[in-house]
Each structure stands twice: as C-alpha cells, then as structure tokens.
Image (cartoon, grey):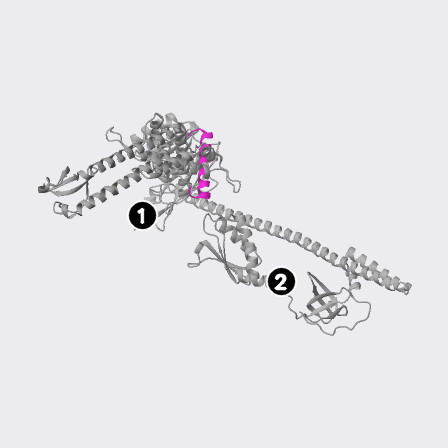
Amino acid sequence: MNSKAIRVLEFNKIVDLLKEKASSILGKRHIEKLAPSSDFAEVESMLAETSEAQAIIIKRGSIGLQGIHDIEDKAKRASVGASLDPGSLIMVADTLRVARILKNNLSSNEEEDFNYPIIQSLSSSLYTFRDIEDAIFNAIISDIEISDNASTELRSIRRRIVQKNQSIRSKLNSIISSTTYQKYLQDAIISVRGDRFVVPVKAEYRSVVSGIVHDQSSSGATLFIEPMSIVDMNNELRQLKIKEEEEIERILAELSSMVGEISSELLSNQEVLGRLDFAFAKGKLSIKMRGIEPKLNEDKYINIKNGRHPLLETDKVVPSTIYLGRDFHTLLITGPNTGGKTVTIKTVGLFALMTQSGLHIPADFGSSMCVYDNVFADIGDEQSIEQSLSTFSSHMTNIISILRDVTEDSLVLFDELGAGTDPIEGAALAIAVLEDVNMAGAKCIATTHYSELKNYALTKEGVENAAVEFDLETLSPTYRLLIGVPGKSNAFEISKKLGLSDYVISRAKEFINTDNIQIEDVLQNVEKNRIKAIEEREEAEKLRKEIERLKEEYNEKIEKFSSQKDKMIEKAKSEAFSIVRQAKEEVETIIKELRVLEEERASKEKNRKIEELRKELSSSMGSLQPTVKSMIVPKVSTKEIKDLKPGEEVKVITLNQKGSVVSVDKNKKEAVVQIGIMKMTLPFKSLQKTKKDTKNTVTKSTRSIIRSKSGAVKSEVDLRGMNLEEAIMEVEKYLDDAYVAGLEQVTVIHGIGTGVLKTGIKDLLKRNHHVKSQRGGQYGEGGAGVTIVKLK
C-alpha cells in the first residue's frame, strides 16, 4: 500500500486510537504491525473477527483482559533452569489466570446463543494450568513477600524466628529495666544494628558493660553494644534467618521449575493472548465510533451511507453519503473553500484503508466497500524548501508517481487538482491527468475550483459532478455532499452579503459568461428536488413496511383468536357432554329402581314414557341441542317460582344439583344458573329456591392447617445460594403457604449476583395467581437484592 497515502490520510491516528483500546503490550505489538491488505479473503476474515469481538463485548460487557503481561523472557529463562524472582512469578500467574478466564468466558454455552467461531478458535487454543497458577498465588503475596503457606518448613522457621525475637527482647528488657544497668544506658530502649539486637550505652561506661560494640552515635557519646548474654541468641536468630532465605530460594526455584516445564505452552499463550487483545481492541474502537462492518463486494464499487470522518468530533461531524464505481468511476467535487471537499475525499480514502485493515467504519448499515490493490492520494501542500520545489512542483511530482503505478484496481484521490499554476493551463493539465487515470481503469475522486472541469464532467461519460452545499443566509457551508450537480464558488452572493455594492457586482458579471452560472443554478435546483424526492420515497417506503408489519400482526392475532375460539367451544361442548352423560347415568339408575319397585304395577304407558325419555337423553348427548331442556324441566307440575334475584341459591329439580343464580330475565321467566364450572339458562319451572347453608364449611382439620400455617409462615423467603429451578419450586410453595396464612405482603430475598435468579423470580411472580403486585426493594428493605410482593 502506498506509504504517502497512508500518511496524508492520517491512518496513523486511527492506529493510535486503536492502541488506546488495547489492554496489554502484546495487543499493542499487533496493532503496530497493522497494515491494509489487498487480499479479499484476508480482509473478509479480519472484518469478521472485528464483528465477533464487537458482538461479544456488547453481549458480555467485560471480557477479562486485565492482567496480561509480556512473560516471554521469563518463560525462556525458566526453561533453561534459571530461578525467577517473586514479581516475575506473579506476572506468570496473572497471565495464566487471564488465559483461564478467557477460555471459560468465551467457551460455547448451550443455555444461550453464543457462537463466534473465529474468536472461539483462538480462545480454545489457550493452555490452562490451574495447579501452577494456584501454587504461585498461594506461595507469593507480593513482589517482595513470600507467604507462610509456601511450605510447612518456611512456616516452622518463621515461627521459631518470632519466638527467638521474643526471647531476645525479653532478655534485653530485663537488662534495660534493671537498676544496675539503667545508669549506664543513654536510653532505656532496644535497638537493632546489622540484624543484631543492641542497647545504647554511654561511652564512658564501655568497660563496665561487657559486650560487642556494633555502632556509635555521630557525637560519639553513645555506643550500641550487644550484651554478651544475648550473643548466642542473636547468632541463633541469624542462623534461622539464613535458613529462611534458603527455604525461600528453594521455593522460588521449585516454582520456576514448574514454569520452565510449560514454557512452550506459555509462549503459545502469549501469541494467542496478543491476538485476542488486538481483536477486542478493534471491537472496542468500533463501539466507540458507532462503526459497522461494511459489506464487501468484488465489483470495485463503494457505497458509503452517512459516513462520518472518524477523527472529527462525533457531535460536530456532518455525515456524507458517497458512492462511486457503478454508474460512474470518476467524481469531481467542486464548491467554496472550507466547504468540506478535502474532508470528503479523506473520509473515502480512510474508509478504504480501515476496511482493508479489518476495522469497522463509522457509517450506517447497508454501506458497501471493495478491496483496492492500492490507494493513492495527493492531498495538501507539501512544497519543499530544501529541494527548491514549489507547491505546483511538489504536487506534479507526486501525481507523476501515481500515474506510473496506478492500475484498474486502484483508488486515486486528488485534492485541488491542477492548482498552483495558471488557471487555464492548470485546468488543461487536470483534465489530462483525469483522462490518464480513466484510461488505466482506476476509480478517482478529485476536488477542484475550475469551471472547465465542471463542464468536462457534464460531457464526459463515466465522470460525475458533485458539490458541497453552501448556505447563503449564514455565509457558511453545510458540509453536505450533493452528487450529480456542480458546485459554485458563490463569490458574487458572498460579496453582496458582505456589503459590496450592486453596481460593482453587476460590472463583474459582465466580464464572465453567465450561461455557465445559469446552468449551474438549474442543475442545483434539479438535484435538490431529486434528493427531496428520494427522501420522500424512502419515508413512504418506511411507512409501507410499517403498515405491512401491522397487517401481519393483525392477521396473526385474528388467526390466534379464531384458533382459541374453536378450542373454547370444543372444551365447552366436552364439559357439557360430561354433565349430560352424568345426568343420563343418574336417570338410568332411577329407571332401574322404578322398574324393580313397580314391576308388577308398571303399565305399558309408563314404560313407553320411560323409553321416550331415554331416547331423548341419548340424542342430546350426540348433538347437545336444546332438547336437553326436556330433561331439565320437570314432567310433574310444580309450584313455579315467582321471583328470583342474582346470587340466590337454587336447586335444579331434575338434575338434583344446587347452583347459584347469575342473572335473571323476568320477561322470559328464565335464569342463568352457575352449576360447578357450567352456566345454564333454565326456566323458573325447573328451579326451586334453597336456603344458604349458614354452617361454616371449614372442617376442623382445615382450620387446624390454616392456624398452623399462619403461625409458622414467615414474612420472607431467602433464595440465596439456590439455582433458578430450586428457587422457583421454593417460591411457589411459599406463596401457597403465605396465601393460606393470610399474609398480605411478603419479601422474596434473591440477592443481586448475575441477575439470572432475580429475573427468573420476577417472571414467576408475574404469572402466579396469588400475587397482586410486586416491586423492587427500597433503601432499608434490602434494595436491589429483594422483591416486595403483595398478595391478593
């Protein structure tokens, strides 16, 4: 890839942004090597890797990359038998811990949709050594401190050192507190000199206090003497400390040996961890830029929808829609200075470099990019005083090198093509350069002020004009790109707004050809109308899709309702059939009893009526038609009820069933009666009023159960430590007990944790028929770790 283009398009600043997202030096090393690729398959794979990393970060949040260290030299030293210091071993253990956590976090999970093959292929190749990791963390506390748990021998030595210290201090305390020695001491304190316990003695009493002099004060008035009575004890303490150091060295050597045995696996992990850190840095940058993975095409065209330059502030950058390579292969952008022409071509060039480096681009979904074999750019003023090159000369030198290397698969960007020399000659050269690029088959975007190039774009096939919009009211650019219309310098309008007299402006217009200006005005109006029509068409398309979606939802609801309606009717028929069948069985029993009791007196007429009743019941079971009413209305004349009210208890005479009146129609002398789960419309003739049973239906055993529940059920249930399935069973049983006990409000303690338990319990509470309402806990109630439930 052309190094000059990479530099002028400021790709290095994108690399710097990417470095900020890396968690380790290993990831930054990969970022430093980042370069655009011209291989389609490689670019496709790199973009997919970035997309997977972005998706994982969005789904999981923190990935756990903190703690990765560069331990390559440490692994190599350990492999040849060198002993590592505590700090190096901690770095090894930290890196092993990160590798283990990453492998676990990125492994496939059957409970959720987690399938990211590129990232998971990397994470699955990580080696984990939990035993070595735990051994190091168990033995080493910090860079300078070894734990007592490192070995039983070290613990024993350190306990003896503490005991010896206490013995020496006890002995010295007895010396400095005795009346015999107090007059010889400068201070009644115990001091340490060179790992030896000493006491401060006045210099004039040196001969009186027997011992070894280890130090003296700067004035010479005080000598620090080790009394002879503790010399042996100090020697023993020194021996213990030497043993402690030897044991620590042995422990470090043992741990280093363990690291050395897995040095090749550690080096492999280093490469994989660096790759993963690099991938997730790309994902983080994509999220920060609100980037998307562009759709790659092999037809050498680009279609950028609302692209935003990644180095500009997100709240100030104006999105641009740019397309090139289908209807035209060369785009000429014209317009006033500071209008955004240079930013536009830099955005296109930078997007090409980012895409081919596997990075997402800050644009809208649906954007498409291709893979170029090279990106060339001639942007900015690069005149060289040392080489005596003017602005024009430096531009032409660069253009010559571009024309020499350009191919049909290249992208060429020219800023102010032909500037820096005579306008007429510059315009002619610019057209010639564009023609040469056109003959090579490359895609090209150029900015210019020359009217000749605008006319060239209007007449040349495959070349299209574009303009950056300018607001004459505010005398400032809008930075919007209008493809298909040439731009205007707007010099006359700007001058008029600034106060230049109309006379001077009119005189100026006489010296130029106004035909071109009029054509530009017409084209600009046409393009604005075209853009407005496109926007309105897109809005109409959105509305059409929304209407279609609503229509589909409506049809689904209608279909669902119809299905449920049929099921409800079928269920009602089934329940009605069961009731009638039960009634038929009861009638059969009565008939049998009647025949037995009146066998001798039974007349033919009676038997005929009985057979008719049986046939009528049989036919009612088949069709469930209103003929069932003939079974319900009694054959024997009874006293008809004059008045009924909803809520009264009645008895259906023929069915010998009790029910409750739901509603009454006095005109038809009918009532809707609830019998169990069934509602039936019955005439007053078939009903008989009954008195409500005032007795308490609650049995003695039921009353005792309720009394025991109300006394034993607590106002809260603790689910912490349970999995979701156990918690659901516990809550359902608890709510039943609490409801029976008459509790109005209870507290469900689920903790915060990962949120799985809390979410599952809230869903259960929504469905439970005992629950009236639920809310999260407030301050003093348990906060987010509890849910307050009100019962019906």
Residue at far front of view: 180
- The answer to whether residue 305 of the structure is visible from this angle is no
Which circle marks residue 495 in the picture?
Answer: 1
**Residue at which label 2 appears:** 701
In the rendered structure, the answer to whether residue 567 lies left or right of residue 729 reads right
Image quadrant of residue 323?
top left
Residue 180 locus on image (x, y percent): 14, 46
Q: Main secondary structure of the magenta part?
A: helix
Percent coordinates x, y for residue 523 in the rendering: 44, 43
Q: Amino acid at mark 2?
A: Ser
Q: Is residue 494 left or right of residue 521?
A: left
Q: Nearer the viewer, residue 519 or 618?
A: 618
- Tell me which corner region of the image, top left, top right, bottom left or bottom right, holds residue 661: bottom right
State the CA–CA distance, disc 1 to disc 2. 101 Å
Q: Tell whether 169 sits left or right of 74.
A: left
* Location of residue 768 by image quarter: bottom right
Residue 352 magenta:
no
Q: Which mark is residue 88?
A: none
SS label for mark 1: helix
User: What is the magenta range?
Assistant: 37-62
